[in-house]
């Protein structure tokens, strides 16, 4: 495998993980109330998931997503369920 092929493979793997994360976010969004406050709480979690794919936000995103995710709890969404979906998608690790 050449250096270029490895770089392309790595880029596609990153894109695939990002697509899986976005699919999980679409599923999670359905559980949040369709209210301004529900949208805000979902947006906080969605931003943390998006930050997993940035160098500057990765550390705080992982810390938040491993926390009790109070923003989900407030809306009646089980944070353990969100973590399980992200882990099953291969986006979040233990």
Image: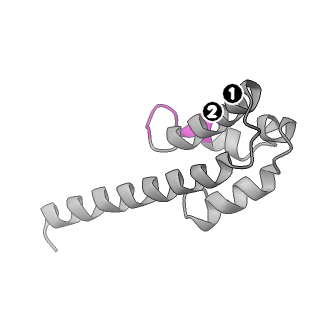
Up-down relation of residue 59 to residue 77 (above or below): above
Helix, strand, or loop for circle 1? helix
Q: Quadrant of the N terminus?
A: bottom left
Q: What residue sits 72% from the left and 25% below the top?
A: 36
**Horizontal and vertical percent for residue 13?**
36, 62
Up-down relation of residue 21 to residue 64 (above or below): below
As drawn, the residue found furthest toward the front would be: 34
- Give the magenta range: 54-61
Q: What residue sits 83% from the left and 38% below the top?
A: 75
Helix, strand, or loop for circle 2? helix
Q: What residue sits 61% from the left and 34% below the top?
A: 60
| Residue underneath mark 2 | 43
Image disc number at residue 40: 1
Report crowding for label 2: few under 14, some 14 to 19, many 20 or more residues within 10 A (C-alpha): some
User: CA gap, disc 2 to disc 1?
Assistant: 5 Å
The quadrant in which residue 84 appears is: bottom right
Q: What residue sits 15% from the left and 63% below the top?
A: 3
Image disc number at residue 91: none
């Amino acid at each position: 495998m050449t250096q270029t092929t490895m770089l392309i493979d790595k880029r596609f793997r990153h894109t695939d993980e990002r697509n899986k994360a976005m699919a999980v976010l679409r599923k999670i969004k359905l559980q949040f109330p369709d209210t301004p406050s529900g949208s805000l709480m979902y947006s906080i979690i969605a931003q943390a998931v998006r930050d997993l794919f940035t160098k500057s936000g990765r550390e705080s995103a992982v810390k938040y997503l491993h926390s009790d995710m109070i923003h989900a709890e407030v809306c009646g969404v089980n944070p353990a369920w969100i973590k399980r979906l992200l882990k099953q998608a291969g986006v979040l690790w233990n």
